[in-house]
Structure formats: C-alpha cells, structure tokens
Amino acid sequence: MEGTLPEPFAGWFAGRGWSPRPHQLAMLAAARSGESVLLIAPTGGGKTLAGFLPSLLDLHEKPRPGLHTLYVSPLKALATDIARNLTSPVAEMSLPISIETRTGDTPANRRARQRETPPNLLLTTPESLAVLLSSPGADAMFAGLASVVVDEVHALAGTKRGDQLALCLARLATLAPGARRVGLSATIAHPDAIAAYIGARRRIEAPDGVPPAIAMMLPEGRLPWSGHMGLDGAPEIMERIRAAAMTIVFVNTRAQAELIFQALWKLNAETLPIALHHGSLEVAQRRRVEAAMAAGSLRAVVATSSLDLGIDWGGIDQVIQVGAPKGVSRLLQRVGRANHRMDEASRAILVPANRFEVLECEAAMLGVAAGELDGDPPRPGGLDVLAQHLLLMACSAPFHPDAMYAEIAASQPYAGLSRGDFDDVLRFVEDGGYALAAYERWKKLFRDSEGRVHVRSERVARQARMNIGTIVEAPMIKVRLAGKRGFGPVLGEVEEYFVNLLSPGDTFMFAGRLLRFLRLREMAIEVAEGGSGDPMVPAYEGARMPLTTNLADRVRGLLQRPADWHLFPEPVQEWLRLQKRSSRLPGRSDLLVETFPRGDRWYLVAYCFEGRNAHQTLGMLVTRRMERFGMAPLGFVATDYVLGIWSANQPTDVARLFEQDILGDDVEAWMADSSMLRRTFRNVAVIAGLIERHHPGAEKNRRQVTVNSDLIYDVLRRHQPDHILLRATRADAASGLTDLGRIAAMLARVKGRITHMALSRVSPLAVPVLLDIGRESVRSGDDEEALLAEAEAALVAEATGEAEPPGPTSNVPAIHRRNVERGRRRDAQLQLFPRRRA
Amino acid sequence: MTAAPLHFAGERLMLDPAGALIWPEAGLLAVADLHLEKGSSYAKRGMLLPPWDTRATLDRLALLLRRWQPRIVVALGDSFHDGEGAARLPEGELARLAAMTGFSRFVWVMGNHDPTPQAGLGGHFVEDYVAGPLLFRHQARRGAEGEISGHFHPKAAVPARGCAVSRPCFVTDQRRIVLPAFGAYTGGLDVRDPAIARLFPRGGRAFLLGRDRLFSFAIGPR
C-alpha cells in the first residue's frame, strides 16, 4: 500500500512504522479527481491527517506562495493543536509549506500580515473566517484557494455556527470556484444530510474502531427515586478515579459539575489532583486545566460539554458519565474522549442518578451496541445569521441582491430560502425593515444606480465586525473576589437571575470554591472565600439538553419487554413489576395517562417521553384546556420522561386533553408571551445585529448601550407582529425551546391510543415526578403576578400573626431544599438591602 | 388598575401601577424618565431598534392623563433620551404631545440626558420644581426632605419559589420617593445597587409594578 504514496511521504510513514490507511488513500484519489468529499471516521482514525494529506502532496509537487488550504474547526484550541501536529511532519520532510493559525487570539499585526501574505495552510474557526471574509481584500486573499477542510462538521451542521459557516463556504465558492471541500465527521445519524451540508457528492467511510466497553455503576445502598445530580455515586466514582491514571467525569450541567466536584473532594483523602472545567469559569482558568491535562499532571477532571470536543489529550483512560446520557451520539462522543486509538476499546462507566436514568442508561448502552445513532437532521438556516452575514458581505464589497440570493440559496441550510424572506432580511439590515419608515437617515446600507448594495460608512462596517458571532449567552454577571485594595481576580460568571436570589452573607459554590456574597456592583458581584451554612449552587438557563427521540423510543421499548428486565438492577425490576401490577406500563406507540387523588388535589401524569422542552410546552397547552374544562389546574412539572399536572378538580375525559387541536390557531399568539419566546427573541436580536453586544468605545460603560430585549420584543410585537425577526423567533422556538414540532408528532402518533388509568393512589412510576414538584417552575406573565401576590401575602400574614413561617418540605433534595428555604425566609422578611452588621 | 395611597410629607399621594405618582389635592401627576426617542437615538448610533418607543410611551401616558385628568404634569427629567430628542419627534407624536401640553400644564424637569430646554414643546422647563412641601427633581440628593425624583430606574427582584420575579418599582422612605422609569425602552437598576441603596440608609419600602396593582415589600436597613 505504501507504494501509492510518493516520497518523502512514504518514507516518513514507514519511518514511524505506519502505513497509510485505506480511507487516507481514498481521500488522495478523491483530491486528484477534484471531488468534494465527506470523510466519516471514528475518533483516532487519522481523520485530520487524511484531510490534510492531499494538500501536503499537492504543495510538495507544486510549491507556490499564497493560501492553498483553509482549515475550519469549531474550537480555537483544536485549530492550534492541529497546526502544531502538522508542523512536525512538514519540518521532518522539509516540505516548503507555511502553516499558521488565525483565531480571536491572533495578534493584530500578524492578522494584518496574514491578509497581505497568507500562509499555505491557514487554520481557523467559523467566526474568524467570517471576519476575514468581511474585509475588503477577501477576494484577493482567497482567489487561489484550492481546498477547504471543515473538521468536526457534525458538531457544526444544524447549529447557528454551522449556518454561519455554510454562508461563508458559499461565499468562498464564489471567490474561489475551483476550491474543493472536505468535511471530516465522526460517525453520525444522518450522513446524507451532513454530506449535503458540506456540498460533497462523495462519502468515504473508515471502518469503525473497536466498540467501546461501557458499563453501568450503581451507588451503594438504595437507588434514588428522583434528582439529577448523582451525588450518591461519589464514593464509587472516587474509587474508579483512584484506580485509573486519568479520568474525565462528564456531567450534564454546570451546577452538577460544581456539586460533583465538591463531593469528590470531600472523599479525596489523598488529595489527588482533581480539577473542574465548565463554560462559566474564567477562560484563563479553563486553559490552565487543559494545559494540566495535556501535561498529564491531573488524575481527573469534572467537566460539562465544555470538554465534549477538543484536542486529543491521549492519556485519558476512562470516561465516567454521571447522570443520564440523553442521547446515543452524545454518549459516544463523550466516550470517545477516552483513549484516542482505534485498536483499543474506550472504557466508560455510566452512573445513573435515579431510576428513570437507569432505564435511560441501559437503553443508551443497547443503542451503542446496535450502532443506532441519534440526533435531528440539520434544520433550515436561521434568518438572524443571514442578516449578520449580509451586512458583513456588504462590508467586504458591494453586491447585487440577485447574485447574493443565488449564492446563498446554493448553500444547503438556505436551499429553501424564499426570495421574499431574503428581501425582508436584506431590508432589515438596510433600515430595520419596519412598517414605519423612520430611519431613512440612519440606513446601514445604500443602493447605487445599478442596484448594488453598499455599506453606508466605515463606522457601520467596524461595528458589524465587532459583533460577529452566533453564540449568545444569557445576561451574565461577573463573580469577583474582593481584594484588599479594590477588586480581586474574576472567577467567572453567573446568570443575573441567580444574583437576584442572593442576599449579603449567603454562601454559594462556584469555581470549586465556597464563596460568600458581599455586594452587587453594576456588572459584577463581589464575594469573599469561606462562610458557613448550606451553600446554594448557581444554575444556568437552557443548561439541560432534552432526551433524544431515538433514546426515548428505546426506553419505551425496554419498558414493554419484561423479558429484557433482567438487564436492570433488582430495585428497578421490582419497581417495574409493581407498576405492572398496580397500573400498567407505557407502551411503545400509545400514551399512558394516569390520574389519581392525593391529599386535597388530583394528579395527572402523562408518560410522553418527549424531552423536557416539549413537556414544558405541552404542560402549558394541556393546563390551558383543563382550565377551560373547569378542572382548575394548579401547576405542572415537566421532566424528560413525563408531564405531571395537579388540579383542584378531577381530570376526566383525558383523551380530549391530548387531542391534536390543543395546537390550535391561537397557540402561537398565546405562546408569544412565554419566557421561552422572549429568550429566543433575545438570541435572534443579538445575532441579527438589532442589539449590539459590543459598541465602539463603550466597553467601560455597558449600561449605556445595553437595551432590554424584552421591552423591544413587546413594542415590536404590538406594532409589527409579522416583522422578520419575530418570524425568525417563532421558527427558532418551534424547533428549540418550545419543541412544538415534537409535540405535534407525538399527538399525531398517539391519536386514538390514549390509555387512561384512573387510579385510587399514586403509581410506582409516578413517584419520581411527584418528588420533582416544587423544584421545577414555569413562568409566564400570569404566573409572575401570582408569585408576587403569594410572596406579598406570606409577608402580610406573618406580620399580622395569622400564619407561621412554613416549615421545610421533606421530599426536596438537600441542595434544593436550601434554595427553597431561602426563598421562604425571604418571603417572610425580604432583605433587598444589605443587613446591618452587628 | 388599583392605585395605592401613600402618606408622605403630610400629603396623601397615590402610586399608580403604571408607574406614575399622583397628588390628588394638587391635581398633579408625576412620571420619570420617559426617554422619548430612545429608539432613534440608538438608530443614530447604528442600532435600528423598532421605532415605536415614543408612541408606546405616549400611549401609556395618554391613558394615565385620561384616568387622572391632572392639571399639572411633572416629567422628572430624562424625558428625552438625548438633547436633540424633541427635534426628532415624528409629526404625529409631536401633535399628540402638543395636545397633552395644551390640556395639562407640563413641567419639564431637566435631567442628565436632556440638560437643556427642548425647542418646540409646550410647558416650561425647570431645574427643580417646588410645590407645597414637595420637591420634584431629577436625581435624589442627600439630606433632602419631601423629595420626589427619578433618574435611577429602580427595579427589584423578589425571590419566590426558587425563582426571582423582577419588576420596576417605586422606592420610598420618610424623606423621599424614587419613581420607576416610564419609557418603553428603559431598563432598570437593582435597588440593591449602592447607588440606590445609599439613598435609603434606614430601609424603606419597594412597590413593584404589577399588571393591575402594586406589590409592596419592606426593604431592610443598610
């Protein structure tokens, strides 16, 4: 096989005892015929080298200056790491090839130089590519481009970053029509869709590596009914860490990361180096942890999805997933972080936090064994991303709308974009696209006599470039240690809502430390280390990802087949047998709904298995109908598996509560007021450039430029409900936070197959969701009014001696209990200001 | 809509859940921080916000004027988002404002956003406005008595059932009342922020704006 590689490549391969793999040679053949191609290979399959090899060969045969290959990776760190890994073979073979990276960290002078004299191979991120393409010299820089390599394309396609990249690729196709595209992907559920995304007709698939060895580990003693943190498993996790050289402990949320980290350190008598890594920690801190991993000086890292992707650290020999895996593909991605070699099995351990998660873990392991991947096919591209792109393109050079529309419609995410929507987006960029033509004077774009679109001024262009990017964070407040003189170091960021729950003296866990809240100052809170009492833990919105459809289907299948129950630990088997005796088990294609009285309320539990987001929306829809039927619903709680509703009156005629027409015409209008839509609008408005994140010269006084997106949403909704950004918001929410699509599919599937079990008491399967009540909350305009009234009434009642302060709720797990109690305590004596020190 | 009575400086005042203060005996209504033409002010700087903010704010003000029929309207400063705001008023809104200033006597207290009189508006422009025991000004000052002001856009968050509900609010004690911002695009500053908290060293009350009524909460001493 080596014969097919020319020298010095063959020699270099032989020198390391390697031989080129078949897929690497197939990639070379594809390059010779000028084909665009998608390579699907498991981790450790020599994917990246396969992507670059054709470029190295070409430049060896025909050395030339100028940009030859552009490499795009979702991670800065990955781009830097690949550059390093390429530099050594290039040096060892003395190839005349220049390699450089370009990311947000690249110094300004090097960036300027790269535009003048670009390297042969440029490694970058989607955002940095967008910046390059927005500069006036983009056409010259990319004219000679021969190849574009997109790494980890499965992590980009279907996301807003992926939309942005697709638009940039479409632009590159115009600037460099001869450039071929190469997509590198992990094994995925929808290879055709990913191939279409990259624009490749040809697919090359490397053989799968050794299947991973995944096992489930249960906490010693009783198996919890509910809760998602998995703290009971800490002693077993610690044992596994002791027994391995390097472990990544993956968790599902940042709050869970803090808690598991604390729990492990309490057991860490021998003070093994165990670190914490999540997306809200200060960047410098995260880099330190990554460097320590690379240097092999850590024994374990507790991490969130912040480490799902990333460079190959090599030395990781096991992965522990605490809590539900949520999807087969996601689990495989995480498991693949251990042992980046194809010829050895990656080792992984699943630690479910409750009984339902045991079912989910078992289903995920079966899914892995069956090679059944999940994940949704990429959705149509976002109009907000298109708006950002159009402005950036105008910054680079004037364009004609007809040509631009043709260019964009050639990219897969925007293939279905109508000319009407395109024109509306362009008008939005131009002058806001409002029915009231108020901003003639402040247009961002103007059209010349030939109809070409120009950016109005260099200032507009500068502002546009400052706001590139599609990742929008919730409003965050910095956490700063108070120093002896003024400010100490920043530890990271928490969401504004969490700060609202704190009063001075309260303690909370963050960045692996116990911190005491001192005071709030503009955009930061000041904290001190230490303190006493049960600390709170900051949570982050949208942090939990919902269960995938495929995995949900497998869980339902498992429940239906008692023959497979031997896979489960005994308490789970017993739990299911009890359920079968006292009610029935949810079927694969029907919908089981149980109702039962308890205390002075009625409960309704629907076993939908459609994920939290969908259940949240379904809860709003069903309670609205119950309201109409006079059942007086009082509240609901949504988990990944079930929807639980409690009401004052008995729910009857249950099938009518889940009829398809609950998704009636007025749903959208009514949903528009929900917090889900408001959050979605904020993201859309920021990405589309309606609200700027950065304003020239305004960094020091952010309050002057930040505007409240809720207020803008309200005004826009009232005066122009069909505005393009509101349309974009509804489309986003339907597939995202409200998951209306998934609800519609479920209601259609279970039509005529709703099984109502009217029970006299709670069923075994319903126990977990009852325990969740009081922990989860849903907010809409009405609910807020009710909450305010409740808080105020509690205060009045207590002040007049009519009510005792409520006692703690016993079925709330400790960590939440603390949060709930604090809420109560403050209902009784609200301390909006710092307390006087004794 | 239920307004809440408040005894202050020997007078009986009403706090309207829409965010206005009314002094029935004097036939006076006060609002703070209208920030009219904030949208176009941002448009000038490159953010093309929906252009209906002035209309939305005046819609709400018109409702208040209809409900209370005040003889005097005191706008407590920052009535326009910038010094040229009045000049940018769309014709329709300018006419509406003219009708309002024809109906009631408008007292425009000047604020930091609009520190000079704006041309073409009815009513008159003042630094401070004194009426009986009450002193109306844009920004609260230490040591004042019977002071009614705006400027800070106070809001407060009330923890309830593990989440927090945040609303614009009036903040009061024996000496002063700080009004919430009235403008459609005006955000808020948490009452815990030192800039507001130091005005209320002995604590006071926050009245959070609800849809139909106010929600009252005690605030602890500093």
Image: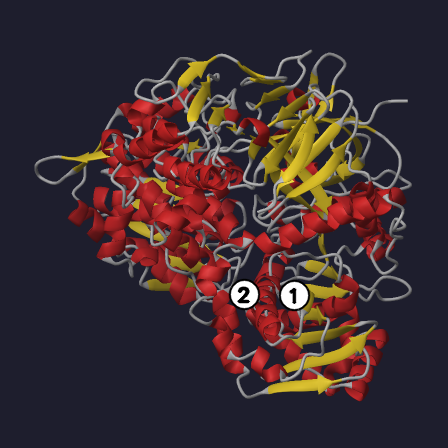
Looking at the image, is A575 positioned above or below residue A487? below
**Image coordinates for residue B51, horizontal then vertical, percent:** 34, 38
- Residue A288 visible to an observer of this rendering: no
**Image coordinates for residue A94, horizontal then vertical, percent:** 41, 33
> Which residue is depicted at the point 47% across and 68% down?
A741
What's the CA distance linking mark 1 and mark 2?
A: 31 Å
Which of A461 and B82 lies nearest the eye of the viewer? B82
Horizontal side of residue A399 vs A8, given as left or right: left
Horizontal side of residue A738 vs A799, given as left or right: left
Q: Which mark is residue A640?
A: 1
Q: Residue furthest left?
A: A449
Q: Which mark is residue A8?
A: none
**Occupied quadrant, residue A470:** top left
- Residue B193 visible to an observer of this rendering: yes
Amino acid type of the residue tagged 2 in the rendering: Asp
**Image coordinates for residue B205, horizontal then vertical, percent:** 72, 32
Q: Nearer the viewer, mark 1 or mark 2?
A: 1
Amino acid type of the residue tagged 1 in the rendering: Asp
Which of A205 and A214 lies nearest the eye of the viewer? A214
Which of A299 and B173 lies nearest the eye of the viewer? B173
Chain containing mark 1: A
Look at the image and tell me in which quarter the N terminus of chain A lies.
Answer: bottom left
Looking at the image, is mark 1 or mark 2 earlier in the sequence? 2
> Which residue is depicted at the point 84% across and 23% down?
A836
Question: How dense is the environment of label 1, judged by Cα within 10 Å: few (below 14), some, or many (20 and up)?
Answer: many
> Which residue is depicted at the point 73% across and 38% down?
B217
Look at the image and tell me in which quarter the C terminus of chain A lies.
Answer: top right
Q: What element does badge 1 sit on?
A: loop
Question: How dense is the environment of label 2, judged by Cα within 10 Å: few (below 14), some, or many (20 and up)?
Answer: some
The residue that label 2 is drawn on is A208
Same-chain check, marks 1 and 2? yes
**Image coordinates for residue B155, horizontal then vertical, percent:** 62, 34
